[in-house]
Image (cartoon, rainbow, N blue to C red):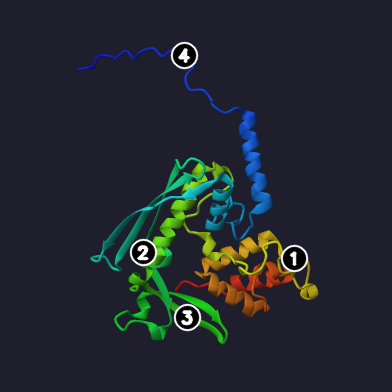
């Protein structure tokens, strides 16, 4: 049986109207872009991978909080643990309010989570002699790495040291919640994104004692000019593909070029590093 049609009441009026004119919106975005350009440091406050939108890091989020007069409030933390899963599953979910320093009102609430089954936490790479006796190496994923004395094989096994990650997971969830709140509160998602893979972990940071405006100049005796942004992006992506963390990448750069940071490389040295990372890429077996 056909149901009778319901007559919706006719709507009168102009509907929803804009509350901010284009001029004010354009000015606000331009001020934000100018702040990012003059005061935020690539590689520390945000990262750029390929042609994608820059990824906002925690230091950059804290700078935006300062310029917009915001402070992080008390976080609400939800914790989950399941010992029946292999490996053990641990999860944190954090809700973090951003509060105005002027009137104390909550401006935005960000949400972030982290769990032990994320790729970078669920697995760990070990050498053959570190393998548990009950895990046949033939059944495991393998990768070839370059070391000081040549190439060697590592095996990927479940991370059974989950309890050691507890504090790391909590910090990661808080960081993600902060960045989520800042992107929304400052309307800066037009300029930045929040990458769930947290590319900050692959960023070569400058020592805290070095002024951000005083970068190490490249040694041009082995080539010129400076490393390009495209080369840096490619190196970071290749390192990520190999499963290298910041410490491993720093060591690789030092071993290959004798320098401890990407920004000090010449284009020629960067090309050499890219070749090494490409030829030494972990080979699936």
Dot 3 falls on a residue whose secondary structure is strand
Q: Are marks 3 and 1 in contact (CB under 8 Å)?
A: no
> Based on the displayed image, in which of its 4 quarters is residue 169 positioned?
bottom left
Task: Tell me, for residue 13, which label it has, or none.
Answer: 4
Residue where numbered disc 2 is placed: 116
Contact flag, marks 4 and 1 (Cβ < 8 Å): no
Give neighbour class at mark 4: few <14, some 14-19, many 20+ (Cα, 10 Å): few
Badge number at residue 153: 3
- The answer to which of marks 3 and 1 sits earlier in the sequence is 3
Residue 226 is labelled as 1
User: Which is nearer the N-term, disc 4 or disc 3?
Assistant: 4
Residue at the spot x=60%, y=60% of the render? 44
State the image coordinates of residue 164 (x, y, percent, origin top left): 36, 72
Above or below 191: residue 240: below
114 lies left or right of 191: left
Reading the chain from its start, which is encountered first: label 3 or label 2? 2
Nearest the viewer among 253 and 106 is: 106
Question: Which-is-in-front pick, marks 3 and 2?
Answer: 2
Judged left or right of residue 210, residue 189 is left
User: Which type of secondary structure does the marked residue at label 4 adopt?
Assistant: loop
Count residues near mark 3 (Cα–Cα under 10 Å), then give few for <14, some for 14-19, many for 20+.
Answer: some
CA–CA distance in space, label 1 to label 2: 39 Å
Percent x, y of residue 119 = 41, 64
Q: Position of residue 105 (x, y in %)?
A: 45, 40
Circles 3 and 2 in contact, beta carbons < 8 Å:
no
């Amino acid at each position: 049986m056909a149901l009778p049609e319901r007559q919706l009441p006719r709507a009168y009026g102009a509907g929803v109207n804009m509350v901010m004119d284009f001029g004010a919106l354009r000015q606000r975005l331009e001020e934000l872009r100018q702040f990012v350009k003059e005061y935020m440091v690539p590689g520390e406050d945000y990262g750029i991978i390929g042609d994608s939108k820059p990824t906002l890091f925690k230091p950059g989020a804290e700078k935006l909080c300062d310029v917009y007069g915001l402070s992080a409030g008390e976080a609400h933390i939800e914790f989950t643990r399941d010992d029946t899963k292999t490996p053990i599953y641990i999860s944190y979910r954090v809700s973090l309010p951003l509060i105005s320093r002027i009137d104390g009102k909550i401006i935005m609430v960000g949400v972030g989570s982290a769990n032990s089954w994320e790729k970078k936490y669920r697995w760990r790479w070990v050498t053959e002699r570190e393998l548990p006796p009950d895990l046949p190496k033939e059944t495991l994923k393998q990768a070839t790495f370059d070391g000081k004395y040549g190439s060697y094989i590592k095996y990927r096994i479940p991370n059974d040291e989950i309890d050691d990650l507890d504090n790391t997971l909590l910090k990661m969830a808080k960081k993600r919640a902060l960045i989520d709140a800042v992107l929304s509160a400052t309307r800066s998602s037009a300029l930045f994104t929040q990458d769930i893979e947290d590319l900050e972990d692959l960023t070569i940071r400058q020592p805290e004692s070095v002024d951000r405006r005083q970068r190490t100049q490249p040694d041009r005796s082995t080539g010129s000019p400076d490393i390009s942004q495209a080369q840096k992006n490619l190196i970071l992506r290749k390192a990520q593909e190999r499963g290298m963390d910041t410490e491993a990448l720093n060591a690789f750069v030092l071993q290959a070029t004798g320098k401890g940071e990407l920004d000090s490389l010449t284009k020629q040295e960067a090309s050499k590093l890219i070749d090494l990372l490409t030829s030494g890429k972990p080979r699936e077996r």
